[in-house]
Image: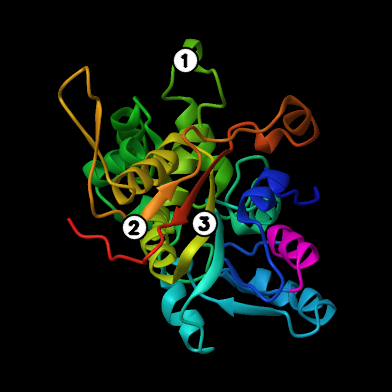
């Protein structure tokens, strides 16, 4: 199993600026890469959230290591407000979110996230609720096609959905190899810039875990919890996620589209966030060479506006 390497780590810490006595939230604990870096940078406290019970269990060593400065909370970062309020925390000095699936989950074949090894289709980060197998064998053709198109941006979604329906007439779809091989048959070779199964697996994973809904909820929760001047750092890995982050920060910073080409953006008076990164920060060539999984990552940073004015439409 490959070692989990947090992407854009130096850039996240540089922008988050941890301070002694500060309180921070790592909404996607995983293997604890960002959490450890925050705790090593300043004498502060981190409330780390993860929906994966494996991550929570395996993180207990770090809890012991940091002697009271780290608290692990099992749940989704979209619910971070209620999770940290149970500890009496109403405001924090920073939030970091690393969106998507972790290396730990991908590398463990039994979790059913990847087609690199044959295993039972699952893809549930929390190990509860509907699995990918449930969806593929219960949903109708249109529902499956819509999921693959919306969350995987797969142009052959209808063809794949038809093939899934035909296949399951004789056999239940149960394994990663079954699905991957089925999808590959549906996509012409000339379109194989990546493995043909990639977009379908991405779509199912996002849908199973409501990742985009959680992202929106997490951004709103971070906005509520941040003190004036505090920052949130959000790392995303594909365009669907990045568009949501970009739109949220743009809206909350009061920028709205203007039809005039001479004044493309207008500023609203009711702003709750300030955009720190005008364009997303991307990894260096050195980082992508050392960690190929970092190649599509993008970091956007926003700061809570002074005065803590509530944002209104």
Of the two numbered discs 1 and 3 in the rendering, the one whose residue sits closer to the viewer: 3
- Crowding near the residue tagged with mark 1, few <14, some 14–19, many ≥20 C-alpha atoms within 10 Å: few
Q: Which mark is residue 272?
A: 2
Q: Which residue is mark 3?
A: 232
Q: Nearer the viewer, residue 257 or 288?
A: 257
Q: How many marks?
A: 3
Question: What element does badge 3 sit on?
Answer: strand
Q: Earlier in the sequence, mark 3 or mark 2?
A: 3
The reply, left or right, for residue 18 in relation to residue 281 is right
Position above or below: 282 against 218: above
User: Callout 2: helix, strand or loop?
Assistant: loop
User: Pointer 1: what residue?
Assistant: 191
Q: Residue at x 75, y 59 (%)?
A: 37
Task: Give the spatial CA distance, label 1 vs label 3.
Answer: 38 Å
Provide the residue span drawn in magenta: 33-43
Residue ID at (80%, 47%): 2
- Reading the chain from its start, which is encountered first: label 1 or label 3? 1
Q: From mark 3 to mark 2, how far is it between C-alphas?
A: 13 Å
| Label 2 neighbour load within 10 Å: few <14, some 14-19, many 20+ | many
The stretch drawn in magenta includes residue 127: no
Task: Measuring from the top left, give residue 60's x and y in whole percent.
Answer: 76, 78
Q: Residue at x 68, y 66 (%)?
A: 19
């Amino acid at each position: 199993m490959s070692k989990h390497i947090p992407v854009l780590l130096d850039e996240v810490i540089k922008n988050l600026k941890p301070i002694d006595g500060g309180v921070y939230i790592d909404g996607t604990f995983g293997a604890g890469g960002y959490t450890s870096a925050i705790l090593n940078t300043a004498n502060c406290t981190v409330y780390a959230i993860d929906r994966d019970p494996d991550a929570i269990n395996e993180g207990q060593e770090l809890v012991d290591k940091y002697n009271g400065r780290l608290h692990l909370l099992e749940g989704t970062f979209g619910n971070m407000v209620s999770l940290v309020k149970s500890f009496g925390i109403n405001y924090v000095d920073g939030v970091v979110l690393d969106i998507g699936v972790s290396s730990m989950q991908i590398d463990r074949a039994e979790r059913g996230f990847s087609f690199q090894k044959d295993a039972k289709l699952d893809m549930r980060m929390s190990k509860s609720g509907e699995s990918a197998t449930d969806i593929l064998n219960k949903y109708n053709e249109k529902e499956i096609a819509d999921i693959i198109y919306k969350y995987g941006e797969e142009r052959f979604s209808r063809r794949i959905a038809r093939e899934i329906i035909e296949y399951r007439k004789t056999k239940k779809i149960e394994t990663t190899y079954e699905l991957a091989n089925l999808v590959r048959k549906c996509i012409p070779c000339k379109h194989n810039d990546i493995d043909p199964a990639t977009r379908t697996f991405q779509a199912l994973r996002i849908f199973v875990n409501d990742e985009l809904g959680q992202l929106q909820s997490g951004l709103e929760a971070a906005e509520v919890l941040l003190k004036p001047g505090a920052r949130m750092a959000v790392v995303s890995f594909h365009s669907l996620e990045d568009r949501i982050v970009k739109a949220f920060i743009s809206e909350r910073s009061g920028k709205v589209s203007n039809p005039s080409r001479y004044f493309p953006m207008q500023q609203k008076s009711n702003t709750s966030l300030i955009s720190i990164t005008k364009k997303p920060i991307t990894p260096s060539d050195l980082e992508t060479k050392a960690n190929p999984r970092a190649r599509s990552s993008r970091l956007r940073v926003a700061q809570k506006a002074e005065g803590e004015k509530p944002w209104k439409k």
